[in-house]
Amino acid sequence: MNIVVGVATYNEALNIERLISEIHRYLPNQKVLILDDNSPDGTAQIVLRLMTTDPLLRIIRRPGKLGLGSATLTMMKYATENNFEAIIIMDADFSHDPKELPIISKLLEQNDFVTGSRYIPGGKCQYGVYRTIVSKVANWGARNMAGIPLHECTTAYRGFKTTLLKRMPLDKIKSTGYSFQVEVLYYIVRHTKKVTEFPIVFADRVLGVSKINKKEMIMSAITLLRLLKKRIMREDAVDFQ
Ligand SMILES: Nc1nc2c(ncn2[C@@H]2O[C@H](COP(=O)(O)OP(=O)(O)OP(=O)(O)O)[C@@H](O)[C@H]2O)c(=O)[nH]1
Ligand SMILES: [Mg+2]
Protein backbone atom coordinates (compact mmCIF):
# COMPACT_ATOMS: atom_id res chain seq x y z
CA MET A 1 0.00 0.00 0.00
CA ASN A 2 1.17 3.50 -0.88
CA ILE A 3 1.17 5.28 2.49
CA VAL A 4 2.35 8.66 3.74
CA VAL A 5 3.19 9.14 7.41
CA GLY A 6 2.21 12.66 8.50
CA VAL A 7 3.75 14.37 11.53
CA ALA A 8 2.78 17.88 12.70
CA THR A 9 5.57 19.64 14.51
CA TYR A 10 5.88 22.65 16.73
CA ASN A 11 9.23 22.90 18.50
CA GLU A 12 10.25 19.28 18.05
CA ALA A 13 13.93 19.86 17.21
CA LEU A 14 14.94 17.43 19.95
CA ASN A 15 12.81 14.61 18.52
CA ILE A 16 12.42 15.02 14.78
CA GLU A 17 15.62 13.48 13.39
CA ARG A 18 15.36 10.28 15.41
CA LEU A 19 11.62 10.06 14.71
CA ILE A 20 12.11 10.24 10.94
CA SER A 21 14.78 7.55 11.09
CA GLU A 22 12.51 5.29 13.20
CA ILE A 23 9.61 5.76 10.76
CA HIS A 24 11.87 4.69 7.90
CA ARG A 25 13.03 1.72 9.97
CA TYR A 26 9.51 0.41 10.52
CA LEU A 27 7.94 1.48 7.21
CA PRO A 28 10.77 1.41 4.70
CA ASN A 29 10.04 2.96 1.28
CA GLN A 30 7.03 4.97 2.46
CA LYS A 31 6.96 8.75 2.33
CA VAL A 32 7.15 10.93 5.44
CA LEU A 33 5.50 14.36 5.54
CA ILE A 34 6.42 16.92 8.20
CA LEU A 35 4.05 19.86 8.68
CA ASP A 36 5.88 22.54 10.61
CA ASP A 37 4.39 25.81 11.86
CA ASN A 38 7.55 27.89 11.77
CA SER A 39 8.87 26.36 15.01
CA PRO A 40 11.20 28.87 16.68
CA ASP A 41 13.55 26.03 17.67
CA GLY A 42 14.49 25.33 14.05
CA THR A 43 12.64 22.01 13.55
CA ALA A 44 12.09 22.82 9.85
CA GLN A 45 15.79 23.53 9.28
CA ILE A 46 16.63 20.05 10.55
CA VAL A 47 14.07 18.53 8.18
CA LEU A 48 15.38 20.59 5.24
CA ARG A 49 18.89 19.34 5.97
CA LEU A 50 17.70 15.71 6.10
CA MET A 51 15.81 16.20 2.83
CA THR A 52 19.07 16.74 0.96
CA THR A 53 19.87 13.04 1.42
CA ASP A 54 16.40 11.54 2.03
CA PRO A 55 14.26 11.21 -1.11
CA LEU A 56 11.23 9.98 0.91
CA LEU A 57 10.97 13.09 3.07
CA ARG A 58 8.62 16.02 2.39
CA ILE A 59 7.84 19.23 4.29
CA ILE A 60 4.97 21.71 4.37
CA ARG A 61 5.79 24.94 6.18
CA ARG A 62 3.21 27.37 7.50
CA PRO A 63 4.05 30.87 8.70
CA GLY A 64 2.90 30.45 12.31
CA LYS A 65 1.28 28.19 14.90
CA LEU A 66 -2.12 27.46 13.37
CA GLY A 67 -3.05 24.48 15.55
CA LEU A 68 -2.78 20.70 15.44
CA GLY A 69 -6.26 20.24 13.96
CA SER A 70 -5.71 22.41 10.91
CA ALA A 71 -2.24 20.85 10.53
CA THR A 72 -3.83 17.39 10.46
CA LEU A 73 -6.43 18.53 7.92
CA THR A 74 -3.73 19.96 5.66
CA MET A 75 -1.82 16.65 5.81
CA MET A 76 -5.01 14.72 4.96
CA LYS A 77 -5.56 16.94 1.93
CA TYR A 78 -1.93 16.40 0.89
CA ALA A 79 -2.52 12.63 1.01
CA THR A 80 -5.69 12.75 -1.10
CA GLU A 81 -4.31 15.24 -3.63
CA ASN A 82 -1.11 13.24 -4.11
CA ASN A 83 -2.92 9.93 -4.64
CA PHE A 84 -1.74 8.07 -1.56
CA GLU A 85 -3.94 5.13 -0.54
CA ALA A 86 -3.65 5.98 3.13
CA ILE A 87 -2.18 8.40 5.63
CA ILE A 88 -0.93 7.53 9.10
CA ILE A 89 -0.75 10.46 11.51
CA MET A 90 1.43 10.44 14.60
CA ASP A 91 2.88 12.87 17.16
CA ALA A 92 6.54 13.84 16.95
CA ASP A 93 7.37 13.38 20.63
CA PHE A 94 7.57 9.54 20.80
CA SER A 95 4.28 9.29 22.69
CA HIS A 96 3.32 7.17 19.70
CA ASP A 97 5.70 4.26 19.22
CA PRO A 98 6.96 3.98 15.61
CA LYS A 99 7.24 0.23 16.03
CA GLU A 100 3.42 0.10 15.84
CA LEU A 101 3.44 1.57 12.30
CA PRO A 102 3.46 -1.86 10.58
CA ILE A 103 0.42 -2.87 12.68
CA ILE A 104 -1.53 0.18 11.46
CA SER A 105 -0.40 -0.42 7.90
CA LYS A 106 -1.61 -4.05 8.04
CA LEU A 107 -4.96 -3.10 9.64
CA LEU A 108 -5.55 -0.50 6.93
CA GLU A 109 -5.73 -3.30 4.38
CA GLN A 110 -9.11 -4.35 5.86
CA ASN A 111 -10.25 -1.07 7.43
CA ASP A 112 -10.95 2.53 6.42
CA PHE A 113 -9.89 3.89 9.79
CA VAL A 114 -7.55 2.61 12.49
CA THR A 115 -6.81 4.21 15.84
CA GLY A 116 -4.37 3.46 18.60
CA SER A 117 -6.28 2.84 21.82
CA ARG A 118 -5.20 3.17 25.43
CA TYR A 119 -8.57 1.97 26.63
CA ILE A 120 -8.89 -1.57 25.26
CA PRO A 121 -7.22 -4.68 26.73
CA GLY A 122 -3.46 -4.45 26.21
CA GLY A 123 -3.56 -0.66 25.99
CA LYS A 124 -1.99 1.57 28.61
CA CYS A 125 -1.58 5.24 29.41
CA GLN A 126 1.39 6.61 31.31
CA TYR A 127 -0.19 9.94 32.24
CA GLY A 128 -0.20 11.36 35.75
CA VAL A 129 -3.46 11.67 37.71
CA TYR A 130 -4.49 15.10 36.33
CA ARG A 131 -4.10 14.26 32.65
CA THR A 132 -5.68 10.83 33.17
CA ILE A 133 -8.81 12.56 34.49
CA VAL A 134 -8.80 15.08 31.60
CA SER A 135 -8.45 12.23 29.10
CA LYS A 136 -11.21 10.12 30.69
CA VAL A 137 -13.63 13.08 30.78
CA ALA A 138 -12.87 13.94 27.13
CA ASN A 139 -13.45 10.34 26.06
CA TRP A 140 -16.67 10.14 28.05
CA GLY A 141 -17.90 13.28 26.27
CA ALA A 142 -16.88 11.97 22.86
CA ARG A 143 -18.78 8.71 23.42
CA ASN A 144 -21.86 10.09 25.15
CA MET A 145 -22.21 13.57 23.67
CA ALA A 146 -20.77 13.17 20.16
CA GLY A 147 -22.03 9.55 20.00
CA ILE A 148 -18.77 7.95 18.88
CA PRO A 149 -18.85 4.18 19.53
CA LEU A 150 -15.14 3.72 20.27
CA HIS A 151 -13.19 3.14 23.49
CA GLU A 152 -10.57 5.69 22.42
CA CYS A 153 -11.61 8.97 20.82
CA THR A 154 -8.74 11.34 21.54
CA THR A 155 -5.49 9.62 20.61
CA ALA A 156 -3.96 11.09 17.47
CA TYR A 157 -2.09 7.91 16.42
CA ARG A 158 -4.37 7.02 13.53
CA GLY A 159 -4.53 5.66 10.01
CA PHE A 160 -7.04 6.80 7.36
CA LYS A 161 -7.75 5.43 3.90
CA THR A 162 -7.91 8.30 1.43
CA THR A 163 -11.04 6.79 -0.16
CA LEU A 164 -12.75 7.50 3.18
CA LEU A 165 -11.31 11.01 3.48
CA LYS A 166 -12.50 11.85 -0.03
CA ARG A 167 -16.13 11.12 0.78
CA MET A 168 -16.15 12.87 4.16
CA PRO A 169 -17.21 16.53 4.46
CA LEU A 170 -13.84 17.64 5.84
CA ASP A 171 -14.67 21.27 5.17
CA LYS A 172 -17.42 21.10 7.82
CA ILE A 173 -14.85 20.53 10.57
CA LYS A 174 -14.56 23.69 12.64
CA SER A 175 -11.99 22.71 15.30
CA THR A 176 -8.46 23.88 14.62
CA GLY A 177 -6.92 22.62 17.85
CA TYR A 178 -6.97 19.37 19.83
CA SER A 179 -10.74 18.83 19.64
CA PHE A 180 -10.26 18.21 15.93
CA GLN A 181 -9.52 14.60 16.94
CA VAL A 182 -13.07 14.12 18.20
CA GLU A 183 -14.77 16.15 15.49
CA VAL A 184 -13.16 14.16 12.68
CA LEU A 185 -14.26 10.92 14.38
CA TYR A 186 -17.84 12.20 14.48
CA TYR A 187 -17.79 12.22 10.66
CA ILE A 188 -15.76 9.02 10.27
CA VAL A 189 -18.29 6.87 12.12
CA ARG A 190 -21.01 8.34 9.90
CA HIS A 191 -19.20 7.33 6.72
CA THR A 192 -17.80 3.88 7.38
CA LYS A 193 -18.26 0.85 9.58
CA LYS A 194 -14.76 -0.39 8.83
CA VAL A 195 -13.13 1.14 11.90
CA THR A 196 -10.91 -0.63 14.38
CA GLU A 197 -8.82 0.03 17.48
CA PHE A 198 -5.51 -1.57 18.40
CA PRO A 199 -3.89 -1.38 21.85
CA ILE A 200 -1.09 1.12 22.38
CA VAL A 201 1.05 2.00 25.33
CA PHE A 202 0.96 5.79 25.38
CA ALA A 203 4.21 7.20 26.74
CA ASP A 204 4.25 10.71 28.14
CA ARG A 205 6.57 13.16 26.37
CA VAL A 206 10.21 12.95 27.59
CA LEU A 207 11.85 15.73 25.52
CA GLY A 208 10.42 19.13 24.58
CA VAL A 209 7.50 21.11 25.96
CA SER A 210 3.77 20.37 26.14
CA LYS A 211 1.42 22.56 24.09
CA ILE A 212 -1.91 21.56 25.61
CA ASN A 213 -3.44 24.27 27.78
CA LYS A 214 -6.67 25.50 29.41
CA LYS A 215 -7.80 27.21 26.20
CA GLU A 216 -7.63 23.88 24.33
CA MET A 217 -9.72 22.24 27.08
CA ILE A 218 -12.40 24.94 26.89
CA MET A 219 -12.44 24.70 23.08
CA SER A 220 -12.89 20.92 23.41
CA ALA A 221 -15.88 21.32 25.72
CA ILE A 222 -17.46 23.74 23.21
CA THR A 223 -16.83 21.26 20.37
CA LEU A 224 -18.55 18.46 22.33
CA LEU A 225 -21.59 20.66 22.95
CA ARG A 226 -21.71 21.59 19.25
CA LEU A 227 -21.53 17.92 18.20
CA LEU A 228 -24.22 16.99 20.72
CA LYS A 229 -26.50 19.63 19.21
CA LYS A 230 -25.79 18.38 15.68
CA ARG A 231 -26.64 14.85 16.81
CA ILE A 232 -29.88 15.87 18.46
CA MET A 233 -30.90 17.94 15.43
CA ARG A 234 -29.84 15.08 13.09
CA GLU A 235 -27.91 17.60 11.02
CA ASP A 236 -25.45 15.24 9.36
CA ALA A 237 -26.29 12.73 6.70
CA VAL A 238 -24.98 9.21 7.05
CA ASP A 239 -23.27 7.74 4.01
CA PHE A 240 -22.00 4.19 4.47
CA GLN A 241 -20.14 2.39 1.72
N1 LIG B 1 2.30 22.08 13.11
C1 LIG B 1 1.81 22.11 14.36
N2 LIG B 1 2.07 21.07 15.19
C2 LIG B 1 1.57 21.13 16.45
C3 LIG B 1 0.82 22.21 16.94
N3 LIG B 1 0.47 21.96 18.23
C4 LIG B 1 1.00 20.76 18.53
N4 LIG B 1 1.69 20.26 17.47
C5 LIG B 1 2.37 18.95 17.34
O1 LIG B 1 1.35 17.99 17.54
C6 LIG B 1 1.84 16.87 18.27
C7 LIG B 1 1.06 16.73 19.58
O2 LIG B 1 1.34 17.85 20.42
P1 LIG B 1 1.82 17.67 21.94
O3 LIG B 1 2.37 18.99 22.41
O4 LIG B 1 2.73 16.50 22.06
O5 LIG B 1 0.45 17.41 22.63
P2 LIG B 1 0.12 16.38 23.77
O6 LIG B 1 0.67 15.04 23.41
O7 LIG B 1 -1.33 16.49 24.01
O8 LIG B 1 0.87 17.01 25.00
P3 LIG B 1 2.40 16.76 25.50
O9 LIG B 1 2.89 15.48 24.96
O10 LIG B 1 2.33 16.86 26.96
O11 LIG B 1 3.19 17.90 24.93
C8 LIG B 1 3.33 17.13 18.44
O12 LIG B 1 4.03 16.52 17.38
C9 LIG B 1 3.43 18.66 18.36
O13 LIG B 1 4.69 19.11 17.95
C10 LIG B 1 0.57 23.30 16.03
O14 LIG B 1 -0.07 24.30 16.34
N5 LIG B 1 1.08 23.19 14.77
MG1 LIG C 1 2.65 14.72 23.18
Image: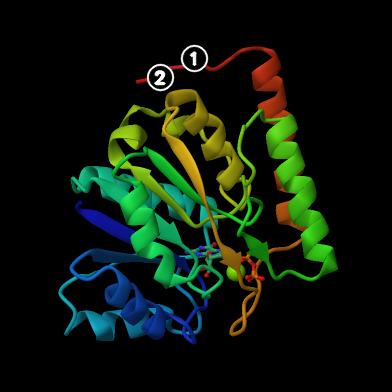
Q: Position of residue 113 (x, y in %)?
A: 42, 41
Nearest the eye: 190 or 150 = 150
Classify the position of the C terminus by image quarter.
Answer: top left
Amino acid beneath label 2: Phe
Name the amino acid, label 1.
Ala
Q: Nearer the viewer, residue 8 or 240?
A: 240
Q: CA distance from mark 2 to mark 1?
A: 10 Å
Q: Is residue 207 above or below residue 185?
A: below
Q: Which residue is mark 1?
A: 237
Which residue corresponds to mark 2?
240
Q: Residue 29 at x, y = what percent?
A: 18, 68
Query: Would residue 62 be seen by someone viewing this image from the given angle?
Result: no
Mark 1 lies within 8 Å of ligand 1 (Cβ measured): no
Q: Residues within 10 Å of mark 2 (few under 14, many from 20)?
A: few
User: Relative to 20, does residue 68 appear above or below in the rendering?
Assistant: above
Q: What is the secondary structure assignment of the residue under circle 2? A: loop
Q: Which residue lies at the image location 20% right of the left edge and 51% below the top edge?
A: 1
Q: Residue at x 18, y 45 (%)?
A: 83
Q: Is residue 6 left or right of residue 138?
A: left
Give the colour scheme of this rendering.
Answer: rainbow
**Residue drawn at x 32%, y 52% as measured from the top left:** 106
Q: Is residue 184 left or right of residue 118?
A: left
Nearer the camera: disc 2 or disc 1: 2
Q: Residue furthest front?
A: 121
Residue at figure coordinates x 43%, y 47% from the top left: 73
Viewer-proximal residue among 41 and 151 = 151
> Which quadrant contains ligand 2?
bottom right
3 sits left or right of 6 in the view: left
Q: Secondary structure at mark 1?
A: loop
